[in-house]
Image (cartoon, rainbow, N blue to C red):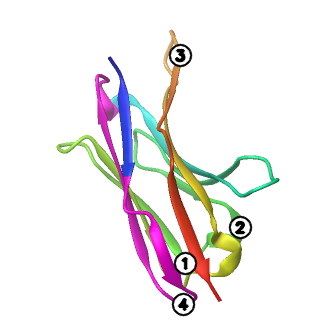
Amino acid sequence: QVQLVESGGGLVQAGGSLRLSCAASGIIFRIHDMGWYRQAPGKQRELVAVITSGESTNYEESVKGRFTISRDNAKNTVYLQMNDLKPEDTAVYYCKAAKVAIPTRTYWGQGTQVTVSS
């Protein structure tokens, strides 16, 4: 059974920091691309950051320079370090695992709430 369990969300003041974690089980973690997505109320889910199995990274424009995605294959965990948080970062943050080799597979976590107060 595949599980992605996010943690680390919470309430923080603008300018503060949070570190999200996503622990994976039931998959061969090192061969999956891992991503963080977020969904604010009334908005579509959007990509925040992705780290490939080869550890290439990509970020949504508004978080560049503030957020850092990383992975620890020994711990089957992906992280999102979020600094200089802004109220517009408020959303539910979801972890996604994607196996790009055939057969492809995609898995999602249950989400963790991040609320940034002004």
Residue located 67% across and 61% down the image = 60
Residue marked by disc 3: 104
Residue 25 in the figure: left or right of residue 85:
left
Of the residues under marks 4 and 1, which one precedes in the sequence? 4
| Residue 33 place in picture, x, y as percent | 47, 37
Marks 3/1 in contact by CB < 8 Å: the verdict is no
Mark number for residue 66?
1
Three-letter code, disc 4: Gly
Q: Disc 3 on helix, strand or loop? A: loop
Of the residues under marks 2 and 4, which one precedes in the sequence? 4
Q: Disc 2 on helix, strand or loop? A: helix
Label 2 Cα neighbours within 10 Å, binned few <14 / some 14-19 / many ≥20: few
Q: Give the range drawn in magenta.
A: 7-30
Give the number of the mark in front: 4 or 3. 4
Label 1 Cα neighbours within 10 Å, binned few <14 / some 14-19 / many ≥20: few
Mark number for residue 15?
4
Q: 22 or 12: which is nearer to us? A: 12
Of the residues under marks 4 and 3, which one precedes in the sequence? 4
Q: What's the CA distance linking mark 2 and mark 4?
A: 18 Å
Three-letter code, disc 3: Thr
| Residue 24 place in picture, x, y as percent | 31, 36
Q: What's the CA distance linking mark 4 and mark 3?
A: 39 Å
